[in-house]
Amino acid sequence: MVLFIAFVGLVAWIFNKFLGGQPDVFYGVLVGAIIYAAIMYYSGSRLALAVNGAREIKKQDNPRLWNIIENLSITDGLPMPRVFIMDDPSPNAFATGRNPQGAAVCCTTGLLSIMNDQELQGVFAHELGHVKNYDIRVSMVAFALTAVISLIADVIFQLTWFRGNNRDNQNNQLFFLFGIVAAILAPLIATMIQLAITRQREYLADATSALTTRYPEGLISALQKIENTGSVLQRQNTATAHLFFANPLRSHSLANLFSTHPPIDKRIARLRGMEDHA
Amino acid sequence: MLVVIILIVVVVLVLVAVWAGYNSLVRLNVQADEAWSDITVQLKRRYDLIPNLVNTVQGYASHEKTVFEDVTKARANALSAQGVQATAQAENQFQQTLKSLFAVSENYPDLKATENFQQLQAELTDTEDKIMASRRFYNGVVRDFNTRRKIFPTNVFASILGYKTDKEFFELDEAAYSQAAEPVAVKF
């Protein structure tokens, strides 16, 4: 995360040099980017829930689900999160919330019907692991940084059309070139970094689930079931895709670098490895 | 001059280490206390279900007096137990009496069919799960506290700061624990 921030700082510095003597625009862009990031940060979880059509439930609506989540949050020492259900035959779940006090978990009706109690425990221990490790906050910050870089790159492109005349200074020319290259590559690199971060956090949440339940088999069999039935949801939304338990997007045959989740067989292999280590 | 600077830096580092170590011990200590009180909350929830259960069974099997007396006595015992060891022992005893109460109810299929009894069974199972969950959290915190007390560099000054002993894990009797894991084995 620190490296990511340094990378963003580097891009911002290049951008500053690129502008030469117009710091006002730079600060304007920075302020705009920070405001955007702050909005995402504070309303992110409400957005994530609304955009996926989730409805909140209480204990009497689904005691099985409620009890599982309540018991897991006692085991983790977390306050009980709000519980949501979304209508979709495909099994999947997600957690959102910047800190454990404001957390919410949501799962599909498909998950509830396909999984047995132990598998549900594994899945929700994974989600509560995300809450416990503040992964949602990490993802939001990473996403905001990526957005900042994309904004900066955008502005650079806007400005190149209007700065064709200032080529006398040799130094300026070099940074001009750097600026263009950075504008093209930086959003790409930033996205890859963001996805790598969220993938590592998925592994971490799997490990937290195994530690909480002391029973990795539950999560393993849940992952196997998802591998067979698939986890693609009816509502496709790229902005919230990384929050889900398994990849909700219809697969494009892009390289693994652009996937929000690690491959399921790798996740199962790591969990099996934990069983031997204990 | 250089020696003085190095000395100051070393002293500052030591002070920072002591400060951080002390804070983490305090944090874990308070967390362990909270986790313990959470266990007692869950245990009390379960003990509160018992009078209702005893009354329901008594309605059908009023002559089995000894079982009811044992359960009530064990429950009173468990409610008054203080500290980790005493509570674990009282809990073990209570599990035994609860086993015999359910064994008695096996003989009365009318009783088992009533909605009241089934609901009580479901609530008891859920309470057992919650007790296990809060036990697990407590033991996890105790593990972290004991580890923190023993690892370097905190172990050097832990006893000076007042943390002289490890905390105990809340362990149930192995035989009783396997019963606690499936407290409502209903055989047909």
Image: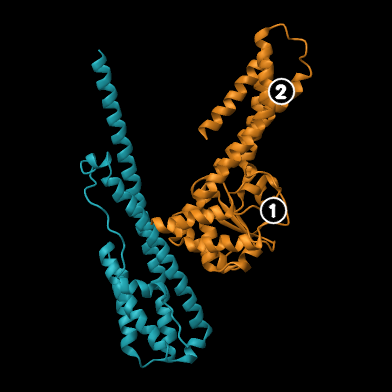
Chain colours: A orange, B cyan
Q: Quadrant of residue B155?
A: top left
Foreground residue, B75 or A117? Answer: A117
Q: Position of residue A38 (x, y in %)?
A: 62, 35
For marks 1 and 2, the one nearer the N-term is 1
- Discs 1/2, front: 2
- Under mark 1, the amino acid is Asn
Is residue B73 in view? yes
Q: Position of residue B42 (x, y in %)?
A: 41, 65
Does residue B77 sit above or below B24 in this rendering? below
Q: Quadrant of residue B59?
A: bottom left
- At label 1, counting other C-alpha atoms closer than 10 Å, the crowd grade (few under 14, some 14-19, many 20 or more) is some
User: In the image as oriented, which residue stretches furthest toward the bottom?
Assistant: B63
Q: Is residue A205 left or right of residue B3?
A: right
Give the total number of marks visible in the rendering: 2
- At label 2, counting other C-alpha atoms closer than 10 Å, the crowd grade (few under 14, some 14-19, many 20 or more) is many
Foreground residue, A245 or A148? Answer: A245
Q: Quadrant of residue B26?
A: top left
- Under mark 2, the amino acid is Ile
The structure residue drawn at horizontal position 28% and vertical position 73%, both measured from the top left corner, is: B77
Is residue A80 in view? no
User: In the image as oriented, which residue stretches furthest toward the top?
Assistant: A168
Q: Identify the residue under disc 2.
A: A156
Q: Chain of mark 1?
A: A
Quarter in which the N terminus of chain B is drawn: top left
Q: Position of residue B50 (x, y in %)?
A: 40, 77
Give the number of the disc on residue A52: 1
Q: Could you say whether the residue bearing mark 2 is in a helix, strand or loop?
A: helix
Q: Position of residue B43 (x, y in %)?
A: 38, 67
Q: CA distance from mark 1 to mark 2?
A: 34 Å
